């Protein structure tokens, strides 16, 4: 848990450094994110939540700029939430950013639940999602490419079936999941 906290602080420090370059940072990920989300059924009536949106919520910014829907991002780091709110405001987007923990934040009304790579405690988060998500909702789960499983020791969460998958160029593999 301590190493996870150190990782989170290092990531926030990196994104603070990148903050002045946020447009370039988001532009780098735009094509990759839009390709990734072609597998996800999002429309203007969809409610989408991103668990672990981070201080530069590039996924939400990219999606909100390109696909009309109702977007919410949560993070359990208050500093990340404040930075994320600033970023969304700079883009004049209607994206709600809130302080929230994946283990307690209400998720039962969402059509799409995006789970960031690195959200912990992994097993408890997915048990909670499985228990409380809408029956017809989709989960987008990001993890490292399979060849890195021996290092990170994270496979696929149990109780879900894979509907689609996408390999991003940044060594992240996205899965579109449905509850079994």
Image (spheres, helix red, strand yellow):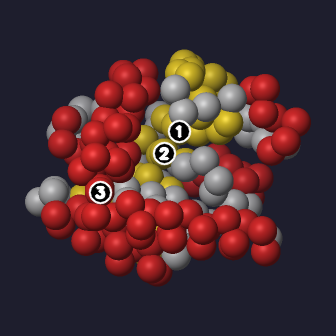
> Could one spot residue 73 in this view of the protein?
no
Q: CA distance from mark 3 to mark 2?
A: 25 Å
Q: Residue at x 23, y 62 (%)?
A: 88
The quadrant holding residue 170 is top right
40 displayed left or right of 103: left
Q: What's the CA distance linking mark 2 and mark 1?
A: 6 Å
- Image location of residue 98, percent across then percent down: 38, 72
Q: Residue at 69% across / 60% down in the picture?
A: 120
| 158, 109: nearer the viewer | 158
- Residue at coordinates 61% horizontally, 31% vertically from top-left? 171
Q: Nearer the viewer, residue 66 or 160?
A: 66
Q: Residue at the location (28% across, 70% down)?
A: 85
When the figure is inspected, residue 8 is found, relative to residue 41, above or below; the finding is: below
Q: Which residue is mark 1?
A: 139
Q: Earlier in the sequence, mark 3 or mark 2?
A: 3
Residue to which mark 2 is pinned: 114
Quarter occupied by the C terminus: top right
Judging by the rendered image, the residue that carries numbered circle 3 is: 21
9 lies above or below 118: below
User: First in sequence: mark 1 or mark 3?
Assistant: 3
Q: Is residue 23 above or below residue 4?
A: above
Q: How many marks?
A: 3
Classify residue 153 as left or right of residue 112: right
Q: Is residue 53 visible to us here?
A: yes
Quarter of the image that includes the N terminus: bottom right
Secondary structure beneath label 1: strand
Q: Which mark is residue 90?
A: none
Q: Is residue 110 left or right of residue 155?
A: left
Q: Nearer the viewer, mark 2 or mark 1?
A: 2
- Disc 3 element: helix
Write down the quadrant of residue 45 in the picture: top left
């Amino acid at each position: 848990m301590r190493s996870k906290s150190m990782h989170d602080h290092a990531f926030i420090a990196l994104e603070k450094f990148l903050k002045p370059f946020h447009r370039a940072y988001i532009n780098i990920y735009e094509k990759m994110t839009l390709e990734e989300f072609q597998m996800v059924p999002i429309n203007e009536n969809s409610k989408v939540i991103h668990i672990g949106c981070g201080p530069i919520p590039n996924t939400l910014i990219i999606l909100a700029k390109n696909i009309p829907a109702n977007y919410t991002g949560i993070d359990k780091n208050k500093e990340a939430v404040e930075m994320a709110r600033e970023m969304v405001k700079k883009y004049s987007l209607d994206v709600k950013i809130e302080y929230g923990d994946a283990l307690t934040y209400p998720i039962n009304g969402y059509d799409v639940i995006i789970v960031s790579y690195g959200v912990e405690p992994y097993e408890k988060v997915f048990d909670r999602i499985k228990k409380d998500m809408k029956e017809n909702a989709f989960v987008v789960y990001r993890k490292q490419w399979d060849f890195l499983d021996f290092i990170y020791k994270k496979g696929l969460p149990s109780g879900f079936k894979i509907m689609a998958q996408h390999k991003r160029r940044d060594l992240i593999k996205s899965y579109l999941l449905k509850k079994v």
